[in-house]
Image: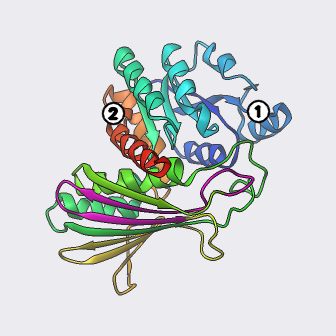
């Protein structure tokens, strides 16, 4: 496929805009439809990015014959049903993390993907960040093996606000959203499935209805372990910080920056064509469509992560 890929994007919030910015750097791709809850705000974003079609309904975008693919940056609870709707309309789909917040819904997404044969992937961005790609390269070259990953996912989010400081229409979740990044990355980097998982959570917030603090332990089949601490109560540096402790070194990844265990910076600028993980994720999506192949972070590849999250949820509810 050499013609321009026509894309619809649903969800013009903080993350949707990150995708629009990334796509501007990718040749042969055009966003032709923007879907979001509030029409005026959607028009405002569409005008900025030169997108002709706007709507508050995903079905309107799916009805456009020229649309080849859809990127979903909508609230978590909509992800699985919308991904299925896209594929049933004959569109390739990339759904932002998390794929689902109920395992049965994620399993159904995979079933429909296998039935349709369309490209379907989930936005597990850590697979694409240059810092983590650099570590992955070391592992694949046989130069580094993970003994332990120590990960901190910290935010200060005691009210329901998004990354732009605007009110959210939905509630974020430490387990199904933020832990998903690390559970998937740990298995991916180890090249080994998670065989043991434990979780503890702090008190449930009286108005948000979610745990604000969580601790997760994982063990991979190859013996590597992972310790993950998550909090919406942390008043300090925000984001996720990864320490890879291995047999031949220690590496610390902070988004797209990488350091060794002595805090000496490692140059990862030549790892990929961009330093932007979201752009790299989108490039993989579009390349898989053009090449007719399974993408990295396909639904089939990431679903084991959601099976682990389901097990952890069962533990926490028990």
Residue 304: % across, % down: 33, 41
The span from disc 1 to disc 2 (Cα, nearest Å) is 30 Å
Q: Quadrant of residue 265?
A: bottom left
Do the CB atoms of the residues marked 1 and 2 lie less than 8 Å apart? no
Task: Report the residue at 31% width, 63% height from top.
Answer: 134
Which sits earlier in the primary sequence, circle 1 or circle 2?
A: 1
**The N terminus, quarter of image:** top left
**Does residue 74 sit above or below 217 in this rendering?**
above
Q: Report the residue marked by disc 2.
A: 300
* Magenta region, residue range: 205-230
Crowding at dot 1, Cα within 10 Å, few <14 / some 14-19 / many 20+, comes out as: some
Mark 1: which secondary structure? Answer: loop
Single out the residue that lies furthest toward the left: 142
Residue 37 numbered mark, or none: 1
Q: Is residue 301 left or right of residue 249?
A: right
Q: Nearer the viewer, residue 161 or 138?
A: 161
Residue 104: % across, % down: 44, 29
Q: Is residue 5 visible?
A: no
Q: Is residue 260 visible?
A: yes
Q: Nearer the viewer, residue 313 or 81?
A: 313
């Amino acid at each position: 496929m050499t013609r321009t890929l026509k894309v619809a994007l649903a969800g013009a919030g903080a993350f949707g805009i990150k995708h629009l910015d990334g796509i501007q750097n990718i040749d042969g791709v055009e966003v032709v439809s923007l879907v979001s809850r509030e029409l005026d705000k959607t028009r405002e974003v569409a005008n900025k990015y030169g997108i002709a079609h706007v709507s508050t309904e995903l079905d309107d975008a799916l009805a456009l014959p020229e649309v080849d693919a859809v990127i979903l940056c909508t609230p978590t609870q909509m992800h699985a049903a919308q991904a299925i709707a896209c594929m049933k309309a004959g569109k390739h789909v990339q759904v932002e993390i998390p794929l689902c917040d109920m395992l049965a819904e994620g399993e159904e997404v995979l079933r429909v993907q296998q039935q349709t044969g369309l490209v379907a992937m989930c936005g597990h961005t850590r697979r694409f960040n240059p810092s983590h790609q650099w570590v992955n390269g070391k592992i694949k070259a046989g130069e580094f093996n993970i003994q332990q990953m120590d990960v901190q996912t910290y935010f200060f989010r005691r009210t329901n606000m998004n990354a732009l400081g605007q009110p959210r229409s939905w509630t974020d979740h430490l387990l199904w959203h933020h832990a998903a990044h690390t559970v998937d990355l740990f298995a991916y980097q180890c090249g080994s499935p998670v065989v043991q998982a434990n979780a503890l959570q702090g008190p449930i917030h009286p108005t948000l209805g979610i745990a604000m603090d969580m601790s997760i332990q994982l063990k991979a089949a190859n013996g590597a372990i992972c310790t993950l601490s998550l909090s919406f109560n942390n008043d300090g540096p925000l984001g996720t910080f990864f320490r890879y402790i291995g047999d031949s070194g220690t590496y610390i990844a902070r988004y797209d920056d990488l350091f060794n265990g002595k805090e000496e910076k490692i140059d990862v600028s030549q790892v990929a064509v961009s330093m932007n993980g979201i752009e790299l994720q989108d490039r993989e999506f579009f390349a898989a469509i053009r090449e007719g192949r399974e993408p990295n972070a396909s639904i089939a590849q990431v679903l084991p992560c959601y099976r682990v999250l389901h097990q952890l949820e069962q533990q926490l509810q028990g």
